[in-house]
Structures are given as C-alpha cells and as structure tokens.
Amino acid sequence: MIVSRLILKNWRNFRNVDVNLRERQFLVGPNASGKSNLLDVFRFLRDIAKPEGGGLQKAVKTRGGVSKIRSLAARQDPEIIVEIYLANSPDEEPIWHYAIGLKQETRGYRQPILSFERVSQGKKKLLDRPDSEDKEDPERLKQTFLEQINTNAQFRDIARYLESVTYLHLVPQLLRHADTLQGRQLEDDPFGQGFLDRVAKSQPRTQKSRLAKIEKALKIAVPQLKQLQFERDESGRPHLAALYSHWRPNAGWQREDQFSDGTLRLLALLWSLLERDSLLLLEEPELSLNAGIVEQLAPLIYRMQRQRRRQVLISTHSKDLLRDHGIDGREVLLLTPDSEGTMVEVATKVKDARALLDAGLSIADAVLPRTRPGNVEQLGLFE
Amino acid sequence: MNTIYLMLAVEDVLSEMVARKLVEQSQKNYWVTQCLRKGGFGYLKSKINAFNKAASGVPFFVLTDQDSINECPPDKIANWLNQPRNPNLIFRIAVMEVESWVMADRKAFTKFLSIPLNRVPQDTDSIPDPKEFLISLARKSRSSRLRADLVPPHGATSKQGPDYNNQLTRFVMGDWDVHAARNNSKSLNRAFMRLEEFKPVTPE
C-alpha cells in the first residue's frame, strides 16, 4: 500500500496542500521551505497510531502543542486538517481514506481535541466523528479511534500501516558515540542511534541475507572493504564490523565507530530500503556520499521497490541525484515559500518546469534551479 | 606491447561504458586512467580546449553525440576548438547518438530484448532518433522487466524508464561486441579504427 494523496490544512508552514504521491517521491525546495515539516506529517500519524506510547495527545505534545503545529498563517480558521488516501498503486482508486481535524480547547488545559475524524473504505463510510456519544462526552474527542484497539477493528490496516512508517536521517556521530550518549536516545530513534539494535533485532536469516546484499553494494562503493559482519562484544552490545584490505595482515577488522560517515550512511540507507514494506522517509540521503554514488540513488531506490513495494519519500538538494533522466516529473514535489506559507506542487503542474521537462531536461535542470535562493549572491557580502 | 594511458571524456554513463568497451576490445594495450563526465555535451564543449591542451601530457578520447542530421563531424571539432587539434586528442562522434552504436550489435541486442532480428536496421547510423527508437523497440520486448525498466511509465514526463542506464550499461559490459557492432554503424567503425591505429605523440 502507498499513500496516494495527501491533503493538509494549516499544518506547520503549509496553509493548503493537496497533492498526489507516487511510489518514489522527491521533495525539493529551498532551505527552510518545510521539507522536513512535510515528512513530519507521516511521523505524526505514526505517533498517533503506534501501539506503545502513542496516541493523539502524545503526538501533539512531543511537537510542542497545537500552537507549534498550526500554521502561523492560520488566522480566521484555526483548524488543522490532515488527510490521507491509501491505495495499492498511484494509478488505482484508493482503498482507504483517513482524515482528522484538530483544534485546541478554548479553556482549561487547552489540550488538543479532534474537530472530526473520518474513515472510509472505498466508497463506504466507516466512521464519522463527532458522533452522538462524542457530543454527550466531549472528553472522548481527546483520543482518535485510530489509536484504540477496540475502536479501530474495522480499519486496523490503516493503523498497522501507519505505525510502521520509518524515518531515516542518520547522523553518524550519534551512532558512533551511542555508548557515551546512552539514555539520551530519542524516541523512535530518527537519527539512527539505535540503528544497530534494529539490525540486532532482525531474524538471523534475514539479517544475514540483508548484510550479504549490503556487503556486495558496499564493496563497489568502498573498494578497500572486503567483508561485513554483525557481531556482539563482551557485554553483548551489537556491532557491525568490516574487514578492510590492509598492508598488515589481520589488522583490517574495524567496528562501526571507525567507519567513515559515508560508509555508515550508505549502510543505514541500504538497510532501510531492505527493511519492512511500509512508508520510508529519507532525509537528504546524498549527505557525505560521493557524487558517483548519489547519481545512482534514484535507480537504486527504484530497483529496491521492485522487490518490496515500499513507498519512499526523499527530501533532497542534490543535483547529482536529480540528474537521472529516468525520474518522472510526477515524482517530484516542489516546495515554494511565500508570505502565506509554503506551496506544494507536483513539478508537472508548474507551467514552465513542465515545458522544460517536456523538452527532455532532467529534474536537476528543469526544477532544481527554482529552489535556489533569489539573492544568494549577496552571501558574498558576509564577512 | 607498450601501455597507452588514456583519459575518457563522455556525455553520460552509457557513453562511458561503450567507450570503455571499445578500448577494452581494441588490439592496443590501453589503460583508462580517468573518465570525465558531467551529464550532457555542455560540459565537454566547455572543457574541450582544456582537454586539447592536456592531451600533450596524456592522450584523450572524447566521445559525443551528433547534434543534428546536417552537422558535419569535422566541422564540429573545428567549431569547438579555438586552437589546432592536438594529435593526442581523439575526437569521435556517435551518429546520431551512442544508442545507435549499442543497437548496432543487432544479434546481441535483439536477443537482449527478445525481439526479432529484423527490427533493427542494417545501418543504425541512419536512425534519426536512436534513443527514441530503442525505447520503441523495448516496448515490444517480451520481458516485462525490461519494458518497465527501459520505457517511461504511462503519462510520465521522463523520456526514459527508471532503470534505463543500468540495464543498457549491463548489456554493453556483457554481451555487446564491438566487432559485431562495427559492421552496422559506420561512425562506430571509424571510431574503433581510429583507436586501433592510434599512436600517442610524446613531446620532445
């Protein structure tokens, strides 16, 4: 299943968004245009749906409350709306529709409350809140039905799908110093501190076959690398070890704390692509990677998707990544900030970008130049 | 036989693989030290005078596509260069695009796509838009994987499928044979002959 359409109102820096999404979707936009905020919608839905420590209240609280989530441009109408459609493929009719509206209590603790929650399966409406019971007991509107096992039975597929959304923005320093930073690991580990635990928790057979695949790819990217394996140290902590060819025999085994940033990021990227089959959010996968590797990321993601139909949303600034002529304009979302928040459009809907794409230009040439700050040259005045 | 060190400068990854294969299948003992490419001919054109100068130190093999049917290859190099061509600069043009060289090994290529041999003309240099032609052939392929990888999906703005480069470079590295292909493409034949005859000139 994939998220085939996303509708937002007043979410962070987006006033109104209504876009179709494909299996592989690139997000491009200037700095601070809200690429991460857009990806955060899916993490927000995951935080609501996840069975352990999830729920609406928690999801809003970890984001600093309704006022932090709501678009600053929302004045007359302060309601926040998040709406998704799930389908088997981008060109098929959606199977599921899930929508919530959010407001803040006008008095008391000013807690977040639902203004509505709706679920449909195909054309059939399964849920339309607030219902009569909600009206009698407004406290009920502090929780979604999605987060509750005894109320989501009819649409548990949606909850299952959302709870396994994965976000990857590996920060090599955090992974390397995971030992010293212990106890400070962020929930759901967006920055990869617990990446090794994830590797450790996988079934031994899957773990072995995934690492074998990754080893094959790493050997091409890092020619000195000869072998990759999983191991535990004396205290049982998981580690990855790689054998590097070295002029001193037997001196070549190194653990992840000695891997280069690029090796670590590539490793985590490949692992995530092989893992699970729900939505994967990748934040700037090009970081610390050589241009020659970055150039291959778009087709690599496509090939991984062929095996497991995992939808991947990728935020990027990389010309090398977007130069691939096999990227369809519909696979690109362009974020353009203006005074009323950021606009999100599929690149093919942007008139002059479309003309350039039709003329055979790559995304790097047709769309990316639009994300360059207008007066970036003035940075030259900074001293 | 003496090793001839050679720099490549090409438009895209497919041209690179083709150039490498040419060098590899040549009788001469070439060693490619580096391949320069930055997507498209603009880079080659902007750097050609630098390559020409550098060629006095290390020989260069520059491979580019022909821009239009009326363009005459000797004119192209003359237009690009602002100095006389260094004898160590091999400048070759694939007519019309490198895809015509790829298809020129008709037997291997039609087998790769599993389509009948006669779908590819005897003279692939005569195909006006080789890439478009190649994709139209891929559309007829019996392999659903090749169709999905090479042909842009319905309604897409992209002019090639999502794994076009990878599939074709794998074909070129594998079954594609220069000796079979040069019979069906005059521009390929000339480029290969040039590599076979080439003797680097060392500065005094």
Image (cartoon, coloured by chain):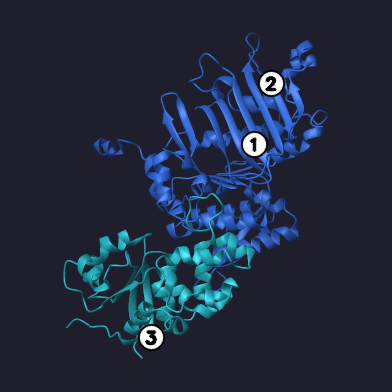
Q: Which chain is blue?
A: A
User: Could you classify mark 2 by the number of other residues whose Cα lies within 10 Å: few (under 14), some (14-19), or many (20 or more)?
Assistant: some
Chain designation of label 3: B
Question: Which residue is the extreme one toward the bottom?
Answer: B1
Chain ID for label 2?
A: A
Q: Nearer the viewer, mark 3 or mark 2?
A: 2
- Structural distance between the alpha carbons of marks 1 and 2: 28 Å
The residue singled out by tag 2 in the image is A116
Q: Is residue B177 left or right of residue A380?
A: right
Tell me the tag on residue A259: none
Answer with left or right where residue A31 lies relative to residue A220.
Answer: left
Question: Label 3, label 2: how many angstroms apart (C-alpha)?
Answer: 74 Å
Which residue was labeled with disc 1? A187
**Height in image: A236 above or below B3?**
above
Q: Using the rendered image, report if marks 3 and 2 lie on a common chain.
A: no
In this figure, which residue is indicated by the disc labeled 3? Answer: B29
Residue under the point 59% across and 62% down: B147
On what subunit does the disc labeled 1 rest? A
